[in-house]
Structure formats: structure tokens, C-alpha cells
């Protein structure tokens, strides 16, 4: 089927309107009309070929919310008219130990990315959610719970699950002491989700300017990381620190903040970091860990949790033709806290 979207044809040109083909639905596929798509930092990296493996033309977008408009003959989970969502992956092998556990993001053969992946049957290059339609196997679609605002919910599909997953892995609940470094798209979701789980949440920031923002998001405290006295006082006072900073930085100042068996979990893909000292690690039995998105089952659990607790990202809605400007603003961290594209604006663009 023919569809329209926005793509970039090389790393140094802006995104522009693009017409392309989506595959005809297979028996277990659903066809979605996309209503909203969040704008993730990865979309920007992808469009600019920052990781060096972008294949052009590239259609980014992996925070996708829409409506089912067609279903394959063997689809059982969804019917036409259902509101559904798709996040960062659209397929996996479905048979390895990780897939069988519902951890498709960790598939031994690698999951298929919503964009920049290769279809497991045809080898075709996958194209993302900055488009009018998406065809996806039903196992990789999520059900949007009733009552969750569809427009605002889109960023839950990447920023939401990326921060929800470590909170669940490290058993955060009432009384847990959680720190969040970085207050962007991911960080603001980490705060809201951890607060929703009943944790005592502290935002860690280099300056005190973020105090009001942190409070508005529900955080209990702000710790200024450039304040040596305050940092010393906060030693051994966290069970889990979620580090969402999207650029290279030094982890060492944060290690002493962890209590015994505490974990600093990194969710941003930032490559090598400054040498971490083993002293606080070994002596305090502390850990440094990483965490990607969650599996499909956990992503559904996160959406249901957000609906039950009325947790939504703070978003700024934009038109499709504003995407290049939005990328520029995102590079300057000039957004509170996530852009979402209203896909109804695509036809006009
Ligand atoms: Zn993302
Ligand atoms: Zn697998």
C-alpha cells in the first residue's frame, strides 16, 4: 500500500515529505493509521547518521499511537477501530529463551527495530512512525488502555518503557530511595513513574534551577551535584539511581551516593565514559548497570499502570512540518519534555 511520511534522504538535509510503500498485511499483521508520534532523541541521531549505520531514505519515529484500520486473516488480538501503539521494535525471533520469557528486546538474534531494522521475511529496511500508516505483526502492538490520553501517551512507548523497565528490574516500590540524573524526556518520566510506584524520588542536577520543575513533576527533593557539602551529606542514601544524561559524563561523583547493594543504572547510549573508580564500587558493594527498553508484556504493563495512575508525559504538540525546527530545539534541550507530532497535520504538509 502507498503511504506518506517525512524522511531524510541524507545526513545533511532536513526531513521532507516522502511517499513510499508499506507491505501488504500478512495473516498476523495489523494495519494502523498513525494518529500521534513522539519525537525521541534517537530520531535525531538516526536522521543525522550519528551512529554511522543509517540507510537513507530514513523515516524515524518509534513512539507510535494509532487506530487499527485493517487486520490479517489470523489476527486474534485486535479488531478494526481499536487504539493501539508500537514502540521501538516490531519483531523478534519469538523462539529463543529471552523471547519466550517476554524479553523480546534482548532477543538472541536481535530484535527488529521499528526503523533501521530489516524485515525478517523480506529483508526490507524498516521505516518508522513519521508516516500515515504502519503495518506490524499483532504480537508487537500494544493495546491503548481506555482513559489514557492518546495524544500525550505516545512518548510512553520509548521514554516511558526505558525508565519503567529498570524501576521494575530493581523492584522499586513504596519506600525505595530513587535518584534521577537528567531531567529531559527520559528523566521526567523516570520521576513520574517512580513517584507513581511510591518511591522517595530525588532529582540530581548540577544547579538549583531545576528545583521547581522537579517539584512540579512530583519529586520529593533536588540534590545539587555541584554542591560538595550536600553530596557528602547524601552519601549512601540511594537504592537506585537512574542516569538519563544523553551525553558523555563522569559517573564517579554519583557512586558514593548509593547505599550497600545500590545500583546506578544507565539508560542513555553514550559510548565510553570516564574511568570509574573501583573504590566505592568494591568497598560499598555497589553496582553500575545498563538497561534498554522493556519487553512487550512489560510495555503493556507500563501502559496499564500509567492509565491506572493517570501518569502522562508533559508534551508539546507540533505539526509534521515543524519537525526540523523541533530537532533544532531538542538539540538545545529546549522542550518540556517531549515533542509529539499530530499526524493529522501530515496531509497538509
Ligand atoms: Zn526512543
Ligand atoms: Zn528471540
Image (spheres, rainbow, N blue to C red):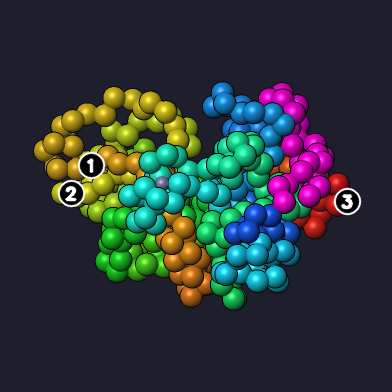
- Rate crowding at label 3 as few (under 14), some (14 to 19) or many (20 or more) other CA atoms within 10 Å: few
* Label 2–label 1 contact, CB within 8 A: yes
Q: Nearer the viewer, mark 3 or mark 2?
A: 3
- Label 3 SS: loop
The answer to whether residue 81 is seen in the rendering is yes
Give percent across and percent down for residue 117: 57, 38
In the rendering, which numbered label is found on residue 261? 2
Q: Nearer the viewer, mark 3 or mark 1?
A: 3
Query: Viewed as shown, does residue 115 lie left or right of 16?
Result: left
- Rate crowding at label 1 as few (under 14), some (14 to 19) or many (20 or more) other CA atoms within 10 Å: some
The answer to whether residue 214 is seen in the rendering is no
Query: Viewed as shown, does residue 9 lie left or right of 312?
Result: right
Q: Which is more N-terminal, label 1 or label 2? A: 2
Q: Tell me the residue that label 1 is attached to.
A: 287
Q: Nearer the viewer, residue 301 or 228?
A: 301
Q: Which is more N-terminal, label 1 or label 3? A: 1
Q: Nearer the viewer, residue 309 or 136?
A: 136
Question: How far is mark 2 from mark 1, CA to CA?
Answer: 7 Å
Q: Is residue 119 above or below residue 47?
A: below
Residue drawn at 19 percent across, 43 percent down: 286
Q: Which residues are magenta?
A: 1-24
- Rate crowding at label 2 as few (under 14), some (14 to 19) or many (20 or more) other CA atoms within 10 Å: some
Residue 232 sits in quarter: top left
Residue 345 sits in quarter: bottom right
Amino acid at each position: 500500500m502507498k503511504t506518506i511520511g517525512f524522511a531524510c534522504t541524507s545526513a545533511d538535509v532536513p526531513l521532507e515529505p516522502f511517499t513510499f510503500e508499506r507491505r501488504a498485511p500478512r495473516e498476523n499483521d495489523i494495519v494502523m493509521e498513525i494518529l500521534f508520534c513522539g519525537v525521541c532523541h534517537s530520531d535525531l541521531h538516526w536522521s543525522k547518521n550519528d551512529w554511522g549505520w543509517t540507510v537513507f531514505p530514513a523515516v524515524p519515529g518509534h513512539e507510535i499511537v494509532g487506530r487499527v484500520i485493517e487486520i490479517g486473516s489470523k489476527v486474534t488480538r485486535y479488531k478494526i477501530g481499536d487504539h493501539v501503539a508500537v514502540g521501538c521494535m516490531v519483531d523478534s525471533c519469538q523462539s529463543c529463551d529471552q523471547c519466550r520469557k517476554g524479553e523480546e528486546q534482548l532477543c538472541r538474534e536481535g530484535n527488529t527495530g521499528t526503523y533501521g531494522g530489516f524485515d525478517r521475511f523480506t529483508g526490507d529496511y524498516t521505516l518508522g512512525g513519521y508516516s500515515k500508516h504502519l503495518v506490524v505483526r499483532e504480537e508487537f502492538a500494544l493495546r491503548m488502555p481506555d482513559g489514557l490520553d492518546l495524544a500525550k501517551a505516545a512518548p510512553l512507548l520509548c521514554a516511558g518503557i526505558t525508565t519503567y523497565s529498570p524501576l521494575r528490574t530493581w523492584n522499586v516500590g513504596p519506600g525505595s530511595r530513587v535518584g534521577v540524573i537528567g531531567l529531559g524526556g527520559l528523566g521526567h518520566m523516570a520521576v513520574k513513574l517512580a513517584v507513581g510506584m511510591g518511591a522517595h524520588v530525588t532529582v540530581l542536577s548540577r544547579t538549583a534551577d531545576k528545583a521547581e520543575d522537579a517539584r512540579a513533576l512530583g519529586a520529593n527533593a533536588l540534590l545539587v551535584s555541584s554542591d560538595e557539602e550536600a553530596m557528602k551529606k547524601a552519601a549512601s542514601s540511594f537504592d537506585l539511581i537512574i542516569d538519563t544524561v544523553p551525553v558523555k559524563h563522569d559517573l564517579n561523583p554519583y557512586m558514593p551516593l548509593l547505599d550497600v547493594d545500590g545500583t546506578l543504572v544507565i539508560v542513555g547510549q553514550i559510548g565510553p565514559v570516564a574511568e570509574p573508580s573501583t573504590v566505592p564500587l568494591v568497598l560499598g558493594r555497589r553496582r553500575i548497570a545498563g538497561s534498554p527498553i522493556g519487553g512487550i508484556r512489560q510495555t503493556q504493563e507500563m501502559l496499564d499502570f500509567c492509565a491506572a495512575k493517570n501518569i502522562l508525559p508533559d508534551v508539546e504538540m507540533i505539526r509534521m512540518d515543524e519537525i526540523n525546527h523541533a530537532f533544532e530545539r531538542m538539540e538545545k534541550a529546549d522542550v518540556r519534555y517531549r515533542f509529539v507530532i499530530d499526524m493529522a497535520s501530515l496531509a497538509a504538509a
